[in-house]
Image (cartoon, grey):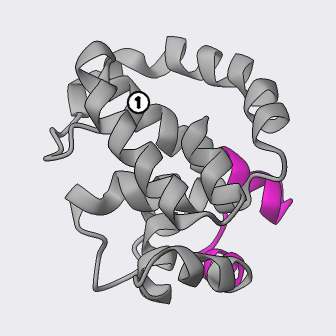
Amino acid sequence: MRIAIAVHKTNKEEWVAAIKAMAAELDDHDPVAIQYWMIYLLRHFSFVALDIGRKPTLQELESLADCLLPRWKQMTPADRRWLVNTLATVWEIDAGPPAVEYEYLGICVSLAMGLLIANPAVDLSRVRPDLAEWWAKNEAECRASARPSPYRW
């Protein structure tokens, strides 16, 4: 929640501090679950933002990225391609090179997700039951396909 709030406020220092705090707390949490929950949340909020009722195309994700790009640039030196590839990666769409390096995916997902959330406390509370239902159905498959991240999330 702290990450989403910091990004929503476009507060780079608070976002970095929240990322570091989360990384320090991961020993007490489940990094595989956190990784997949964040991917689920980015998919959910990008689906809501696009309002198309189906899996998006690469072109639609590029348009969404263009809308988010001004705030993205306030938070990171990573260029538009990183944002497009982050969105494409969570939707399992090939966006071509350069791909977001795996060790940065969690950070990029957290940033993109935070940019898409209109009201972090309300929006995250509303999606929590859907996330729990999705995780109950998909946990075994997610754990079987999980890749360890150098950042453990």
**Magenta-drawn stretch contains 54:** yes
The amino acid marked with disc number 1 is Ile
> Can residue 33 be spotted in the picture?
yes
Quadrant, the N terminus? top right
Residue 17 point in image, percent of width and height: 42, 49
Residue at left offset 58%, top offset 22%: 134
Q: Is residue 91 visible?
A: no
Whether 40 is among the magenta residues is: no
Up the image or down, 2 lies above or below 79; here it is above
| Left or right placement of residue 95 versus residue 153 in this view | right
**In the rendered structure, which segment of residues is drawn in magenta?**
43-64
- Write down the quadrant of residue 59 in the picture: bottom right
Q: Left or right: where does residue 38 sit relative to residue 72?
A: left
Q: Main secondary structure of the magenta part?
A: helix
Q: Is residue 121 left or right of residue 39?
A: right
Question: Callout 1 environment at 10 Å: few (<14), some (14 to 19), or many (20+)?
Answer: some
List the residue tagged with mark 1. 34
Q: Residue at x 32, y 25 (%)?
A: 25
Q: Residue 144, located in which quarter of the rendered image?
A: top left
